[in-house]
Image (tube, helix red, strand yellow):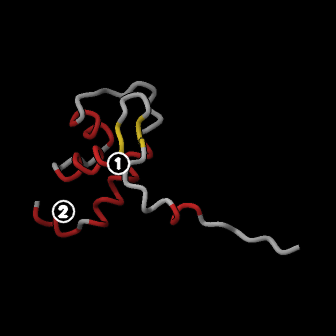
Amino acid sequence: MNCKVIDIHSQLAHINFMIHCICNNINTAKVDAAAANGAETAACVQRACGTKFNCGQCRVDIDARLRAWRIANPALEAAE
């Protein structure tokens, strides 16, 4: 039997408006905007959006998006 493994993570890289926090409707664009304004953690993103954590399940996902944003924007990160 020949099984193929599908890498879905690289397939999702093009999604620009994924919802990261369902409770507060925080999407990728809001996370990226907060990152551009200096947010370094999920809590910083929540504050930038004027919200607070409800269930908190978004922390890991928002932190991962912040890391990805810093990797994609090293010149902006170094300018600070």
Q: Position of residue 44 (x, y in %)?
A: 25, 39
Q: Nearer the viewer, residue 15 or 47?
A: 15
- Tell me where residue 41 sits by quadrant: top left
Q: CA distance from mark 1 to mark 2?
A: 18 Å
Q: Nearer the viewer, residue 8 or 58?
A: 8
Question: Residue at 60% across / 66% down in the picture?
Answer: 7
Query: Which image quadrant: the C terminus?
Result: bottom left
Few, some or many residues within 10 Å of mark 2 (<14, 14–19, 20+): some
Few, some or many residues within 10 Å of mark 1 (<14, 14–19, 20+): some
Q: Is residue 15 above or below residue 55?
A: below
Comparing labels 1 and 2, the label whose residue is closer to the camera:
1
Left or right side of 56 for 7: right
Residue type indicated by callout 2: Glu
Which secondary structure, mark 2? helix
Q: Position of residue 74 (x, y in %)?
A: 23, 68
Which mark, residue 71? none
Which secondary structure, mark 1? helix
Question: Residue at 18% across / 62% down in the picture?
Answer: 77
Q: Position of residue 48 (x, y in %)?
A: 21, 37
Left or right side of 80 for 25: right
Instruction: Name, please, the residue furthest toward the bottom.
Output: 2
Query: Which image quadrant: the N terminus?
Result: bottom right
Which mark, residue 28? 1
Which mark, residue 77? 2
- Tell me where residue 2 sits by quadrant: bottom right
Instruction: Name, please, the residue furthest toward the right.
Output: 1
Question: Residue at 53% across / 61% down in the picture?
Answer: 9
Residue type indicated by callout 1: Thr
Of pointers 1 and 2, the one earlier in the residue sequence: 1
Left or right side of 54 for 47: left
Q: Position of residue 30 (x, y in %)?
A: 28, 43
